[in-house]
Image (tube, grey):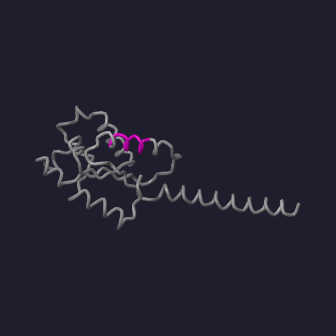
Amino acid sequence: MLRLCLGLLVWCAVWAVQNARADVARIADVQAGRLAMVTPGDFNALAAALERADRFFLDHEPGVAPDAVVMVLHGSEVAAFLRRNYRQYRSVIDLSARLTALGVVDIRICETRLRALGEEASALLPFVSTVPYGPGEIDRLFTQEKFSVF
């Protein structure tokens, strides 16, 4: 009987520690910087990442405002954010604009890719920003800013 009581006591202690760790991890998850990994040139992956960010935002309790999920785009999907392509990519652009306005995502476009497309930053929609080199920005976020994958 003593063994049973000690076993139950140990189990309760382990359970309490695990739940405390889960709560800390949940809080850290909300506060940590996140980087959405979008395969360059995969427009479907971009759309999926935006939908996931939308669900992530809706799933958090009101008043808990996690940092924006950063999306560094440096493939052919960059063309979706050119003003002239709005009609073609309207549903994704509207979702992107709404999530940016709510502070859920921070979309950064690679200037190197823009030049490869023969475009200037002024051709982009107003809610996105640019970075000199997309892969370099991703490396910087992981190494210097300690971002985690969203």
Picture coordinates of residue 144, whole percent (x, y): 35, 67
* Displayed quadrant of residue 130: bottom left
Picture coordinates of residue 8, whole percent (x, y): 79, 59
Check the image and report above or below for 53 versus 133: above
Is residue 71 in the magenta section?
Answer: no
- Please state which of residues 65 and 14 is positioned toward the viewer in this rendering: 14
Check the image and report above or below for 22 versus 124: below
Spot the residue most to the bottom: 144
Spot the residue most to the right: 1
Query: Which residue is drawn at the image coordinates 37% and 54% (left, top)?
Result: 35
Query: Which residue is drawn at the image coordinates 17% and 37% (left, top)?
Result: 84
Query: Which residue is drawn at the image coordinates 35% and 40% (left, top)?
Result: 98
Q: How many labels does the image show?
A: 0
Picture coordinates of residue 56, whole percent (x, y): 46, 45
Task: Tell me which secondary structure the magenta stretch mostly adopts.
Answer: helix
- Assign the N terminus to one quadrant of the image: bottom right
Q: Is residue 148 left or right of residue 113?
A: right
First to last magenta residue range: 46-54
Query: Which residue is drawn at the image coordinates 78% and 61% (left, top)?
Result: 9
Is residue 50 in the magenta section?
Answer: yes
